[in-house]
Amino acid sequence: MNKKSSLVCVVIACVFLIVGSALLVGCGASTTQPQIPTPVGAATWPSDLRPTPTRADGKPVITPMPNIKIRIGAVSEVSLGDMPSSYSALYHEQNKQGMDVLVAHDSQSRYFARNERESLNSVQELYLRDSQTGQEVRLGDDKGDALFGTMTDQYLIWRFQCYRCDEQPGITTGLYAYVLATGEEIVITQGPTKIQWYPKAENQWVLYIDAPNGTRYFADLHVYNLETKEDKLVSHDTLFERLPDKDFYAVNNNRVVWVQRDTTTSDQWIVYVYDLNSGSRRSFIVPYSTPPSSISFSGDFIVWPGSGYDLKQDVLFSISTNVPGWENIRTDWSGYLTVKDDKLYWMVSVNKEIHYFTAPIVREP
């Protein structure tokens, strides 16, 4: 075989395929994936109505450039216990009055938070119970709504919206952290005329939005250090839609990631990564008309529905969460994509039954 023929073969071998909705990237990647048994009684799509894998912006899943040596490995179905603790640490139930109750707990299932209201006209109440001691405390009071934000193994982050603070002194509107082990209450920020909410937390860091009431699309992003009690402005123009499932920022391993609009064009976005210890900052371009949302961040990987970015290789790659063998199955929904270390996790609901999946992110040599 001459050199020209060899070059052609190498190029052909490096073509990127989405086979059976499983993304394959890189030279020598396998073109088959183990088929996962379909749920019993699952309905199927007619072949002409079968959904096409799409990105978050509704466009077809694309393959990266040929020099990207990264692929998504074999998809496996797992149990809830095999998923990251965030999947089981928050759920909903109903109280005796038929009202929705949000329940959350730490990864050790010792501390349980319960957020509920007794009627449509009552305030939102927030309780924290220590399952080892049986002790329960209420956060907030009857002058306003106490709202659960997020929870780590050290802190419960919550917001109080006071409606009658002018009548009598007490807890004012603001964002707070409750120390699980000691019961100490830390004031992160207070501002009755601002939206200071939508927190993300890891270790001593709390990310939160700070915006005047009525703000819709862009806001200030702050990070608060619960150990030093220092607050830092991270960005003036973080994307913001006041929807918890549309988070455009995350914190992991002492680093913050957030999304901003590229002011030079309407068809792409800039994702920034900021190291909280060193103060260094880097960024990359996402050339999609719809911004990355529901961001998950772990190690060197940043992922969102349909796509991901590898900080080690500085490359953007596509992600399909369709399940091999389930191409024709009618699903209720599919989502909650998360990355932990070098593995992807997500859920698929079929006939109101939730199935859990994982797949490794593989860097090719």
Image (cartoon, grey):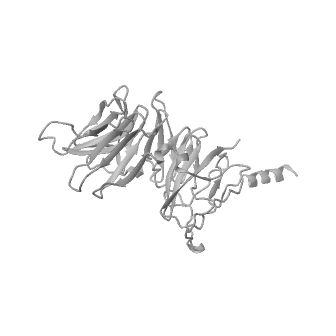
Q: Residue at x 55, y 72 (%)?
A: 49
The x, y position of residue 109, in whole percent, is: 44, 40
Q: How many marks?
A: 0
Q: Is residue 210 visible?
A: no
Q: Residue at x 79, y 53 (%)?
A: 9
Picture quadrant where residue 150 is located: top left
Residue closest to the far right: 1
The x, y position of residue 105, in whole percent, is: 41, 42
Q: Is residue 15 visible?
A: yes
Q: Residue at x 49, y 55 (%)?
A: 335
The x, y position of residue 281, in whole percent, is: 48, 34
Q: Quadrant of the C terminus?
A: top right
Image vertical order of residue 181 relative to residue 107, above or below: above
Compared across the picture, whether 115 is left or right of 302 comes to left
Q: Nearer the viewer, residue 157 or 312?
A: 157
The x, y position of residue 180, in whole percent, is: 36, 33
Image vertical order of residue 160 relative to residue 224, above or below: below
Residue closest to the far left: 167
Picture quadrant where residue 137 is located: top left
Q: Nearer the viewer, residue 363 or 116?
A: 116
Q: Residue at x 24, y 39 (%)?
A: 191
Q: Nearer the viewer, residue 334 or 89?
A: 89
Compared across the picture, whether 218 is left or right of 54 comes to left
